[in-house]
Image: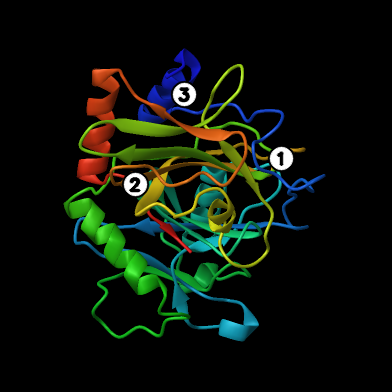
Amino acid sequence: MSSILEEETIALLDGGALPIPDRCDVAPESPQPLKLRHNVCYIVMGILLNDQNEVLMMQEAKADCRGSWYLPAGRLERGESLVEGLCREVAEETGLLCQPLTLLVVEERGAHWVRFVFLAQETGGVLKSPSSADKESLQALWWDTVSPLPLRCRDILRLIKLGLDYRRLPSHPSILPLLCPSPFLVLRLLFVCVSDEEMQVLQSAGDSPHLPTVVCTRRGGSILDPLLSLLQHPPMSCGILGVQHQGGDSADGVCFNIMGVFHGPEPPVVEKQGLSWDTIKDEGLKTRLLQVLKKNILLPLYS
């Protein structure tokens, strides 16, 4: 296993960011850079809980759903980081200031629509009352999740449950987006195959072997679909080790550092030229990887 490959693996396990290479291992010809409000939409959503396990809700002001209730959420604006967008949306729609604690889940419908759901805590502000109604919302309240409340969409119920479950027993370490520019939606792959005899990692072969990177451009389907062209079989399980995003000119893309696991006497056949499997010989690194796989402490990705 090359020193670069080992360094990149350790950096991702430590929750760090890695720069996007000038040329990714898998990419369409002349991919179009992502640009907010043009060819990509990122949604930021906040789940804030108080000491009574009530969740912060806002009442919609938009004509098509006026009067219904939803979690504070909205589109990221150009030049914003994901955290900045979350804090702005929570303040505009509820009147409260907040600090994100971790990403809870990432939901996607291809490279052009991604929702980032945060668990956050209140840090100040004044809860929005009906007298402060504006185009952003009519009011806000703390909801006990049991009392009747007309919801705009029931999709948030499972997300609220995720927040309550995480508060009771965190399922993964705190993961917050790291500032690192990318013009595209990129997957960096830490794919590991575990057998009784050894552990192998998928690498981009060449003079300086490194973790493979994939550019995703599909509007529909899943951002994971391109992985089907790399390997004969998809990973048994996968999740997110980290998220990289910066925002701004030529940097509206995002990079997901994805970890996937395979079990079996042999790793799956590699369909993509230039990729291969390499044996991990460092016992300390093998132990760290096994701990991550055993505890399943990856951020969920919902497609």
What colour scheme governs how the chains and residues are painted in the rendered image of this protein? rainbow
Which residue is disc 2 drawn over?
262
Which residue is disc 3 drawn over?
8
Q: In the rendered view, would you say 261 is above or below 203?
A: below
Q: Amino acid at mark 1?
A: Pro
Element type where label 3 sits in the image: helix
**Quarter that holds the N terminus:** top left
Q: Nearer the viewer, residue 214 or 255?
A: 214
**Of the residues tagged 3 and 1, which is closer to the observer?**
3
CB under 8 Å between callouts 3 and 1? no
Q: Nearer the viewer, residue 185 or 165?
A: 185
> In this image, 210 relative to 122: left or right?
right
Instruction: Identify the residue at image location x=51%, y=54%.
Output: 91
Q: Amino acid at mark 2?
A: Phe
Residue 183 numbered tag:
1
Q: Position of residue 186 (x, y in %)?
A: 61, 43
Q: Amino acid at mark 3?
A: Glu
Element type where label 2 sits in the image: strand
Q: Specify which label sits upstream in the sequence, 3 or 1.
A: 3
Could one spot residue 175 in this view of the protein?
A: yes
Instruction: Identify the residue at image location x=42%, y=24%.
Output: 11
